[in-house]
Image (cartoon, grey):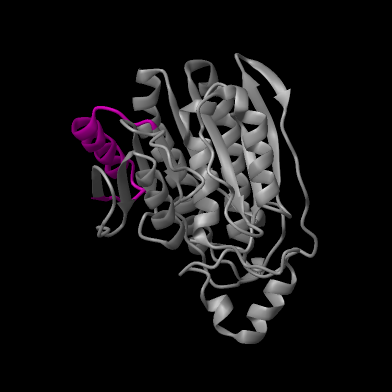
Amino acid sequence: MSAFTDKVLAGRTAAVTGAGGGLGGAILAQLAAMGANVVALDLHEVALDLQGEHLSLVCDVTRDEAVARAAQVVADRFGRCDVLVNNAAILPKPVPLEATSEQLWGQVLDVNLKGSFLCSRHFGALMLEAGRGSIVNLASIAASAPNAVGVYGVSKAAVLALTRQIAVEWGPRGLRANAVSPGLVRTPMSEPFYADPENHAARTAKVASRRIGVPSDVASVVAFLACDQIGNRVTSCGVRNVERVGPSPPAARLDGVDRLPQLVHRLADHHHAGAVFGQAASDGRADAAAAAGHQRGLPTQELGNR
């Protein structure tokens, strides 16, 4: 969390879905450390030991009425929602397409895609009313790298499309939408892939830095996209193959949009083998986004991290 030591989100309210998982917990902690009031959404109540105001809500993101109710609770409690992080996702065991049942296909799309849409619709309504807000969707490099769970990659590719749609439709009304596509990150959901030393070594060898990511790497990028200080500059942007190399980035004050290029390049420098891509929009005008690095040898096995 050293990269964001200032309370740049003080007074803001951030909701994070899938908050009981490895990435969700790290994102919650990062946003809370930056001063935000945080709301944890999960199928089960999440025990929170965080700075500042926080709230845990039980919510099935695949049910419209449940999401609507959660958004109303947040509005009643905090009077606003400034940041939504759609992180909830499920990851089935490896299965070929010909063996993928209609039930499994629907279940994965319900959680990974429909859940992101419903949360964006209801929490986004609070942002539209306020004329500002940031939605950050968690996708995956599986969106563009065929893997052993086809429906997972399909769901994450759709999340990228949803992100672009939100950015284009709601951008003129003050909202931003961006996506983060993690690479290989060690979380409770992906832990089975690292329990076997040989598999762990094989996966590590596929990463240019020879380092498997950790949840805090992803949380730092999400926090960057959530900050109001870059609000009028970055939307419809994707951060792909998040993987930190070396020590954490030096502390940076996010105190002006004029520093956006430096901050983007700083993130790129410290997330080697990744890329920042997409469009950076300012007052309706599109500028070229920064890009840095690439990753070779993408694994064909499951690429999920939660």
Quarter of the image where one finds residue 178: top right
Q: Which residues are magenta?
A: 57-82
Q: Position of residue 173 (x, y in %)?
A: 48, 17
- Give the left or right position of residue 254, taking residue 199 as reference: left
In the displayed structure, would residue 277 be above or below residue 87? above
Left or right relative to 5: residue 97: right
Left or right relative to 306: residue 300: right
In the rendered image of this protein, does residue 77 appear above or below residue 157?
above
Where residue 122 sits: x, y (%)? 35, 33
Observer-nearest residue: 86 or 156?
A: 86
Q: Residue at image x 29%, y 52%?
A: 50
At x 46% / y 39%, what residue is drawn? 117
Residue 145, image x and y in percent?
A: 72, 57
- State whether residue 163 is above or below residue 110: above
- Confirm whether the magenta stretch covers residue 122: no
Q: Residue at x 50, y 56 (%)?
A: 216
What residue occupies the far left of the structure in this picture? 76
